[in-house]
Amino acid sequence: MNSEARHADDAVLVTATDCSPECARTLIGFLERAFPDDGGEGVETQARDHTGAPTVWSTTIDAGRPAAPTGPVALDGTVRVGVQGGPRAVDRVLFALTEAFTVEAKGTVAGDQEREVEVLLRSP
């Protein structure tokens, strides 16, 4: 398998909704520490409502390797998280999340080449 195909299989889109900007930044900071990108910083994007307030935060991470240990992470509320990508990469991200947060499964959709999981995160 060439490196481009491997990289595409390792890319995981993570979205954060129904949370404060601080909780979203905490989650994205955790992901950047757990899955450091050798090629530079990950990209964080925000979708905004009609008032300009952020409603969705998202980042794409490379989950080609198991997560670096980070320990528990404190949140000041709950975060609804969507994790979408190749099955193995999604499993790596979910494992990292369970090591750092209390995770409540909300739903899963699986396709031929991709898996999407929704969870609710809280402080451990």
Image (cartoon, rainbow, N blue to C red):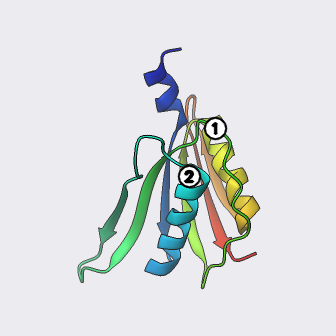
Residue type at mark 2?
A: Val
Task: Give whichever of discs 1 and 2 has the lower sequence position.
Answer: 1
Q: Secondary structure at mark 1?
A: loop
Relative to 50, say whether 105 is above or below: above
- Near mark 1 (Cα within 10 A), the count class, few <14, some 14-19 or many ≥20, is some
How far across and how far down the image is residue 19, in percent? 50, 78
Q: Quadrant of the C terminus?
A: bottom right
Name the residue carrying label 2. Answer: 83
- x 63%, y 38%: residue: 65
Residue type at mark 1?
A: Arg
Name the residue carrying label 1. Answer: 65
- Taking the view exactly as shown, the residue that stands out farthest to the top is 1
Q: Is residue 39 left or right of residue 104?
A: left
- Near mark 2 (Cα within 10 A), the count class, few <14, some 14-19 or many ≥20, is many
- x 68%, y 75%: residue: 122
Q: Where is residue 112, by image quadrant?
A: top right
Q: Is residue 98 left or right of residue 2?
A: right
- x 62%, y 79%: residue: 75
Relative to 26, say whether 41 is above or below: above
